[in-house]
Amino acid sequence: MRQQLASTSFVVNSKTLKLLVIGTFLFLTVAASADAPDATPKLKTVGFSEPLVLASTEVERQSFHRETFVPKRLIIPSIDVDAKVQPVGKDRLDRMDTPDHVNEVGWYQYGARAGAVGNVVLSGHLDDLQGPAIFSDLGTLQLGEMVTLQHSDQVARYEVVAVERYLLEDVPLASIFAATQSERLQLITCAGPYDPVNGYRDRIIVTAKLIRD
């Protein structure tokens, strides 16, 4: 029997990350703090080719012009992902919401748009009662593999630069949600052992950088 689906939330203040667990679905707090620790312990680094840059100030726009857009589709050929992207916001507890369907991906609409300077944050489910969900193979991505965001004829391509796994309480929320001068894509899902009370123990965070045409 598969584990029952549930939800997980992150709550942040200026001094520490406090964990509120409701189960397995991925909720991420968007109130990342400038006081967040510079180094966050990881369970395992699958691959990492450049450091994550944490900037707590406003994003300084690049001098070049690039068209940005709201992503409507996520394509990752190496893990057979071709999924609809659903804009998600925050719930009443100020947490990132989740996509309505397990085979869709949630894009945090208060973050960066596809192709823009900043963090483009997408989350997806690992599984449900019927089996694997859209991000079941996210942790198998390799450095250098391609991730594409689309909206009609608009396309933004990203190259995977990091695949990391964290304990839930160690997820680097500030790095994921804070302002940055980089053009990054963050993909997030659950991982690790499953606890019926607390949900999945870990989170997989994939970071990709924009490929400029």
Image (cartoon, rainbow, N blue to C red):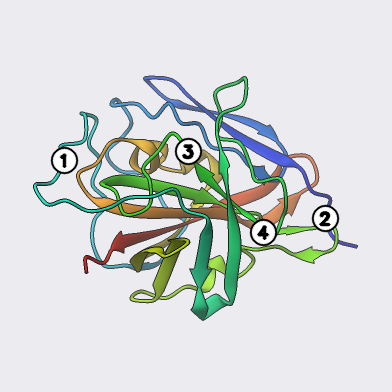
Amino acid bearing label 2: Gln
C-alpha gap between disc 2 and disc 4: 11 Å
Mark 2 and mark 4 in contact? Answer it, CB < 8 Å: no
Which badge, 4 or 1, is on the more N-terminal residue? 1
Spatial CA distance of label 4 from label 1 is: 35 Å
Quadrant assignment for the C terminus: bottom left
Q: CA distance from mark 4 to mark 3?
A: 21 Å
Find numbered disc 1 in the image and state the secondary structure of the residue it sits on: loop
- Circle 2 crowding by C-alpha within 10 Å: few under 14, some 14–19, many from 20: some
- Which class describes the residues within 10 Å of circle 3: few (<14), some (14-19), or many (20+)? some
In the image, which disc is placed on residue 3? 2
In front: 18, or 130? 130
Q: Which mark is residue 144?
A: none
Place of residue 118 in the rendered image (x, y in percent of width and height, measured from the top left)? 29, 44
> Which residue is at the front of the view, 101 or 30?
101
Q: CA distance from mark 3 to mark 2?
A: 30 Å
Query: Which of the numbered marks, if any, corresponds to residue 126?
Result: 4
**Kind of residue sitting beneath label 4:** Leu
Q: Secondary structure at mark 2?
A: loop
Indicate the amino acid at tag 1: Arg
Q: Residues within 10 Å of mark 1 (few under 14, many from 20)?
A: few
Give me the residue at 55% from left, 33% from top. Answer: 89
Q: Kindly report the distance in space between the C-alpha atoms of the residues bearing marks 2 and 1.
A: 45 Å
Q: What x and y, as percent, mark residue 112?
A: 36, 42
Disc on the earlier residue, 4 or 3: 3
Q: Which residue is mark 1?
A: 61
* Mark before the other along the chain sequence, 2 or 1: 2
- The label shown at residue 109 is 3
The secondary element bearing badge 3 is classed as loop
Between 173 and 98, the one nearer to me in the picture: 98
Q: Say whether residue 45 is left or right of residue 24.
A: left
In the rendered image, residue 81, in percent from the top left (x then y), is placed at: 58, 71
